[in-house]
Amino acid sequence: MKTFRSHIYSRFLSGMKSKVVSISYVLIAIILLFVTTNINWGKDDWKGALESDAKGYYAYLHAVFIYHDLNFSFLEKIESKYNQQHIYYDYRSNAHGVLINKYYAGVAVLQTPFFLAAHALTILTEGDLDGYSKYYMLTISISSWFYHLVGLYFMIQLFQYYKIKPKIIALMLFAMSFGTNLFVYTIVEAGMSHVYSFFLVAFLLAACFKCFVKGEKNQLWKCSFLLGLIVLCRPINALVVLFIPFLFPTLKGFFNVLRKYCKLPQN
């Protein structure tokens, strides 16, 4: 098992094709993990893992797996139990007399593996199975950390497709991770949709490059699936399709591929 894990780990880093990029990536991972555990895991800090919109995104998970209630009538009980009036937020909306969640479910889909892991751990430790106890909240920060790193991995792939120098790639990784709002949405606002959108957009662009620029048609299903998830997270993010023409060295190349996939006559 140890040999298998080492093989997966070495294969993952070898995909970066450069020692300086690999070292930068691992260093970023360590720094982010150190910061998020120090800020979000100490004392009662975990209780503030979800605020405002993040509560709406997350609510689908315990509504489906714990309460079996997509009317979200458990909200008042949970809010009164943890009694944090400064971050109280009602994410429900009244639709013709029925309470529904006004947020989209895409973030919850991506958080599902982490939620289930927290649920299993809470059962094993005989904790409170309410979806808001400690292990559930800790995995919010773990999931944002994970998707931040996987998003960076796909950005590395994209940069390498354009033969950008490794040192420049390493600098861009640090700039994205610590010089943009991505850092805040990974550490402080871990339950918001932004870091998940970053991961999906990076994955989509890398897949679109393979599909449309390199001509790997087997990537088309992946592009379609990712675009669907992007819309499910935040519909406005569908505008990412406007970036696809910029993946091509020339606009002529883009239009040639467009004609090919749309089966239009060639000039």
Image (spheres, grey):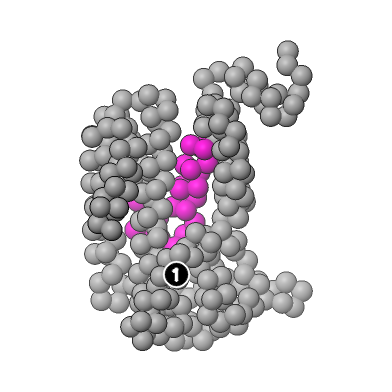
Q: Residue at x 60, y 33 (%)?
A: 217
Can the viewer see residue 244? Answer: no
Residue pictured at 25% horizontal, 72% vertical: 42
Q: Is residue 105 magenta?
A: no
**Quadrant in the picture for the N terminus:** bottom left
Residue 247: image x %, image y %? 52, 28
**Stretch in magenta:** 183-207
Q: Which residue: 72% across, 77% down? A: 98
Name the one closer to the observer, 123 or 239. Answer: 123
Left of 175 or right of it: where is 82?
A: right
Name the residue nearer the viewer: 114 or 180: 114
- How many labels, in total? 1
Quarter holding the C terminus is top right
Describe residue 78's horizontal placement relative to residue 242 as left or right.
Answer: left
For badge 1, the amino acid type reads: Phe
Q: Position of residue 178 (x, y in %)?
A: 31, 46
Q: Which of the 4 quarters of the picture holds residue 105?
A: bottom right
Q: Which residue is mark 1?
A: 115
Residue closer to the observer: 22 or 63: 22
Q: Position of residue 9 (x, y in %)?
A: 29, 48
- Does 243 sit above or below residue 201? above
> For mark 1, does the 10 Å Cα neighbourhood hold few (<14), some (14 to 19), or many (20 or more) residues?
many
What secondary structure is the magenta-colored segment mainly? Answer: helix
